[in-house]
Amino acid sequence: MRRAHRIAAITKTLVERPHHVFSVGEFADLFGVARSTLSEDLAIIRQTCETLEMGKIETIPGAVGGVRYLPLLTKEQALSHVEAICQRLRDPQRILAGGFIYMEDLTSSHELLRPIGSIFATAFGDRDPEYVVTVETAGIPVALQVAQALDLPLVVVRRQSRPTEGPVLTMNFLSGSARNVETMSLSRRALPQGSRVLLIDDFMKAGGTLRGLSDLMREFECTVVGKGVLIEGGWPDEKLIHDHLSLIYLQEVDIKEQKVVVQPADWITA
């Protein structure tokens, strides 16, 4: 096989499973080449990714080492992707009765959400999470992209338990916006005790859901290494959590003026 063909095959394999460590020996055996030849191939791929700012190819030394692709985005790339979603959100036709915003087409768009997964992977990857956790249902598409970008399992917390989940842990939490008592449940088999988890949600008002998820993780004796939110509402002013990372800030929905005021989070534009 020619070098160009090997490089194409290796690149596709690495990009399809970001953060997964592949053995250099497996690649050498697969293509029937020496490790030194494969190292030259990886050097070309690494240089190309760095030059075009397409992520990072990382070589891990040691007996259990290998090579992996990290879908790291620059701040400029992150800002471009987030601003593209903001532009869509500013469309006044998205305003619904009651001041709500229609977002179903955005949260179901693989094209828009895949970069969002890479942004969160860039922000939280060095914290070594072992699971991505979200609550059904709107947060699932966003969390799934994050889990894929980090090559991690996705755990979905249910609003109501299901017989197929076996023994579950159910707890009540206070919704921060409506001040209603709500319920969330998670199968005892879903998370090993002591796991490191990353919490992801699509929209946050006061932070009641994320706080409830944090409390639930504490019951599982898991460590929350990060909290990520796609869109954070500007109201209410008082939030129940403060150690989270939002990508988009929804400041106002003016029904009378048919105007949506939304912007990328400050940490992205800084």
Image (cartoon, helix red, strand yellow):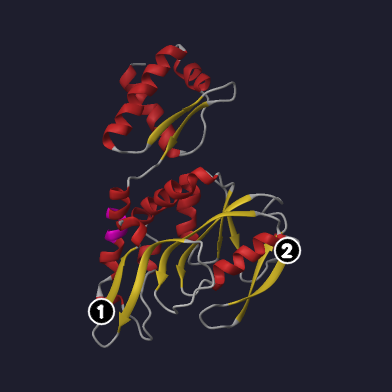
> What residue appears at the point 35 percent right and 72 percent down from the top-left corner?
250
Question: Chief secondary structure of the magenta span?
Answer: helix
Percent from the top left, x then y, of residue 147? 50, 50
Q: Residues within 10 Å of mark 2 (few under 14, many from 20)?
A: some
- Give the number of marks: 2
206 lies above or below 144: below
263 lies left or right of 224: left
Query: What element does badge 2 sit on?
Result: strand
206 lies above or below 247: below
The image's mark for residue 259 is: 1
Location of residue 254 by image quarter: bottom left
Quarter containing the C terminus = bottom left
Percent from the top left, x then y, of residue 3? 33, 18
30 lies left or right of 56: right
Marks 1,2: beta carbons within 8 A: no
Location of residue 247 by image quarter: bottom left
> What residue appears at the point 51 percent right and 80 percent down from the top-left corner?
177
**Magenta-drawn stretch contains 69:** no
Q: Earlier in the sequence, mark 1 or mark 2?
A: 2
Percent from the top left, x then y, of residue 264? 32, 62
Quarter containing the N terminus = top left
Amino acid under disc 1: Lys
Query: What element does badge 1 sit on?
Result: strand
Amino acid under disc 2: Val
121 lies above or below 133: above
Percent from the top left, x then y, of residue 20? 51, 36
- Report, in whole angstroms, how far the alpha carbon at label 1 lies from the one at label 2: 44 Å
Judge by depth and name the residue closer to the eye, 190 or 268.
268
Q: What stretch of residues is rendered in magenta?
A: 80-84
> What residue appears at the point 69 percent right and 50 percent down from the top-left corner?
194
- Tell me the residue that label 2 is attached to: 168
Residue reaching furthest to the right:
167
